[in-house]
Image: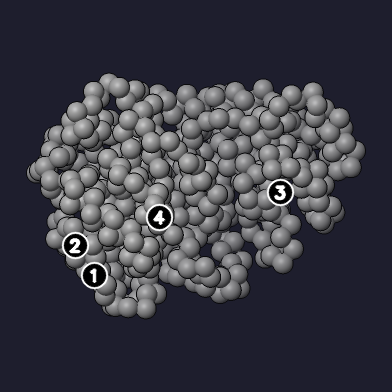
Amino acid sequence: MAKNIMVVGTMSNAGKSLICAALCRILKQDGYKVAPFKSQNMALNSFITEAGGEMGRAQVVQAEAAGTKPDVRMNPILLKPTTDVGSQVIVNGKAQGNMRAMEYYRHKREYIPAILEAYNGLAKENDIIVIEGAGSPVELNLKNDDIVNMGMAKLVNAPVLLVGNIDPGGVFAQLYGTVALLPEDERAMVKGLIVNKFRGDIRIFEPGIQILEDICKIPVAGVVPYTQVDIDDEDSLTERFSRKNERKLVDIAVIRLPRISNFTDFAPFERYGNVSLRYVDSVGELGKPDMIILPGTKSTISDLKWLRQSGLEAAVCQEASRGTLIFGVCGGYQMMGETISDPEQVEAASVEEIAGLGLISMETVFLEEKVQTQTEGVFSGIQGMLAGLNGMKYNGYEIHMGRSGEKLPSLQGNQNIYGTYIHGVFDAEGIADTILKAICERRNIDFEALQSFDIREYKERQYDILADAVRNSLDMDLIYKIINREV
């Protein structure tokens, strides 16, 4: 069975996911077969594996860093919020239906056998498992039924690293407060502290390291600098949404729907020096972009109502009439049709049918059974602005409850209006280039001025940059002693 190490944080956004990704990469570089694991994840940013199972995107990133294929066993429970008090519950890759938060918390310990089956399966096939916690391990009202933080550590006897985020301040209170609130048996499982997202001269913080070790009685395993890497992040606190990007030579606006999902679909457009990718949620922010993207959403009908009430529907339709490229993905694609109906209340909507934007001739009906599949093929039959995609290979995955007709083309639309159910549709070689070339032709811009580069090579380089930064700032001798149970 594999050895293990667990990373928990003092709070959300402490940087657990990227520390885990870095450890996965470091251990891979050192010759180990590694798998990430998170027993329960709450995220709208999900992925469909080759076997057709759904899992959280954070563990997909960590699997990529570890050089292994994503596997639903790496994230046996995924919660996808549908409302402020309810989520769709996915167990080992398959949707189990929607639950209100209180109902889930009453029953979540019943999922422990599924969690252990997934973990033990990975442990038989790998040398080391890097386990990620969620939020804080001392949410005292939730600790009795914890299955993702110290409760998970106990289930698999994992030594723990505790990560604090120094960037907003208060890291001493974060780390000491967390340690102090842990019961004695759980405190003994914490073998190292990590101060994350440090900016400035490390010499100024050196006295702080000794203070933390004195008050917490736990060694500081390292102080990790704030590292600028372009790696997919979690959807709940992503910095992408708060960026106020300047508008560059080519400007792309993504409508930031209230329950936007799979925003990482659009990351390929961020990897051009002179392309701006902005997330907007008001008419004032929209402006006159070269391309508008309607993204996926976990609550299509509710978010369509928001689009209408915010005035963005009218603004998008006006831009469509001006010839601006409009592109919908999954839920955003459904919104672009003529009607969306939910006769079985799959989305818990208050209406059975709602009019769409009317940009594509299509009707969507929500059904209980979820479509979950990877897909690939070759584009054909595309007319208008994106006709250059014809003959190009695509791959990606579908995750949706709605059905919009039989034998839909992989990319539907013409002139300047397009939509698809395929997440990751922009990832394959040449697709983002072709779309941007079409925009450049319309604008009479030289495509070379956009400064493109190889995406796959770029992504691998980002994992190595992250791993180097973390390796150089951690006491790796201590980390290996912790993994080998020598401390």
Q: Which of marks 3 and 1 is nearer the N terminus?
A: 3
Helix, strand or loop status at disc 3: loop
Q: Assess whether mark 2 and mark 1 are in contact (beta carbons under 8 angstroms).
A: yes
Residue with the mark numbered 1: 355
In this view, the residue in front, 108 or 162, is: 162
Question: Given the image, on which type of amino acid does mark 2 rest?
Answer: Gly
**Quadrant of the image occupied by residue 93:** bottom left
Q: What residue type is disc 4 on? A: Ser
Q: Name the N-terminal-most of marks 2 and 4.
A: 4
Q: Do the residues labelled 2 and 3 touch (CB within 8 Å)?
A: no
Q: Tell me the quadrant of the picture where the C terminus can be found.
A: top right
Q: Position of residue 456 (x, y in %)?
A: 38, 28
Query: Which residue is rendered at x = 57% and y = 61% of the image?
Result: 113
Element marked by disc 2: loop
Within 10 Å of disc 4 (Cα), the crowding (few <14, some 14-19, many 20+) is some
Q: Give amino acid for label 1.
A: Ala
Residue 358 has which mark?
2
Dot in front, 3 or 1: 1
Contact, mark 2 vs mark 4 (Cβ under 8 Å): no
- Compared to residue 321, the image places residue 267 above or below, namely above
Q: Is residue 74 visible?
A: no
Task: Residue at 77% x, 45% y: name it.
Answer: 170
Q: Which of labels 2 and 4 is toward the front?
A: 4
Earlier in the chain: of badge 4 and badge 1, it is 4
Q: How many labels does the image show?
A: 4
Lateral position of residue 79 relative to residue 214, left or right: left
Q: Which sits earlier in the primary sequence, circle 2 or circle 3?
A: 3
Q: Name the residue under label 4.
A: 282
Q: Mark 1 to mark 2: distance in Å?
A: 8 Å
